[in-house]
Image: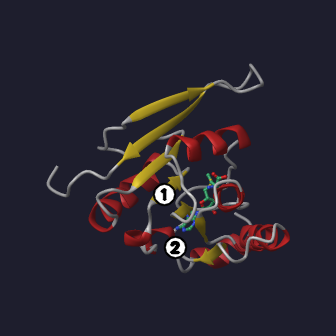
Amino acid sequence: MPPAVAEAVHEAELLATYYPTPELVVQRMLEAVDLQTGEVHFDLGSGDGRIVLAAAGDFGADSTGYEIDPDLITVSSNGIRRAGLSGRARILRQDLLKADFKRADVITAFLTPEAYVQLEPVLRAEARADVRVVAYKFPVPGWQPDEVIALEDRDPAIPTHEIFVYRGAPASSE
Ligand SMILES: C[S@@+](CC[C@H](N)C(=O)[O-])C[C@H]1O[C@@H](n2cnc3c(N)ncnc32)[C@H](O)[C@@H]1O
């Protein structure tokens, strides 16, 4: 683990190693949840900020990325500044499990099945009932997706990308 990440992990558990969502998948994820201008969007573990940039820049959302890797925070914050999106996009150096979930209209995530075991009960307890969630590669355990989208990569050697779309969180008793 790079030293810069190890330092941040004292404050929060590293729930997924950095790996970027392919750009074609990013656009499809945000279209799938019909992200609208002015809606509040969170990317949980925002990496290089590509989803935050697309949400704010291409869809006009108010977008927040939660990230604990200092290098990725620097890269993504610089990207936001360069794109002139500081008014409606930001990266918080904060554990994604402690996001202010009740504010979110739309949540995106690319995390591991193990990470979702921790995130799922928090989401269920704190997110609004009408939140739209879209997860790349791994589904949220115990949630029934409203749609599963399969996307072929331009490179035929890369396996089909899967996106799991949830339009609303299950009730706590489900
Ligand atoms: C698989 S990457 C996804 C990056 C980005 N969302 C994307 O799709 O391109 C997961 C990210 O989550 C971040 N991460 C892992 N644990 C975290 C935590 N507890 N709080 C905030 N970010 C975390 C990692 O540093 C990494 O950048």
Residue 24 in view: yes
Residue drawn at (36%, 38%) of the image:
145
Q: Is 169 left or right of 82, judged from the image as shown? A: left
The residue at the far top in this view is 156
For disc 1, the marked residue is: 107
Q: Tell me which corner region of the image, top left, top right, bottom left or bottom right, holds residue 11.
A: bottom right
Q: Is 40 left or right of 160, judged from the image as shown? A: left
Q: Which mark is residue 96?
A: none
User: Which quadrant does the N terminus fall into?
Assistant: bottom right
For disc 2, the marked residue is: 95
For ligand 1, which image quadrant applies? bottom right
Say whether marks 2 and 1 touch (CB < 8 Å). no
Residue drawn at (70%, 54%) of the image:
58
The relative height of residue 43 versus residue 148 in the rendered view (above or below) is below
The residue at the far front in this view is 37
Label 1 crowd (10 A; few <14 / some 14-19 / many >=20): many
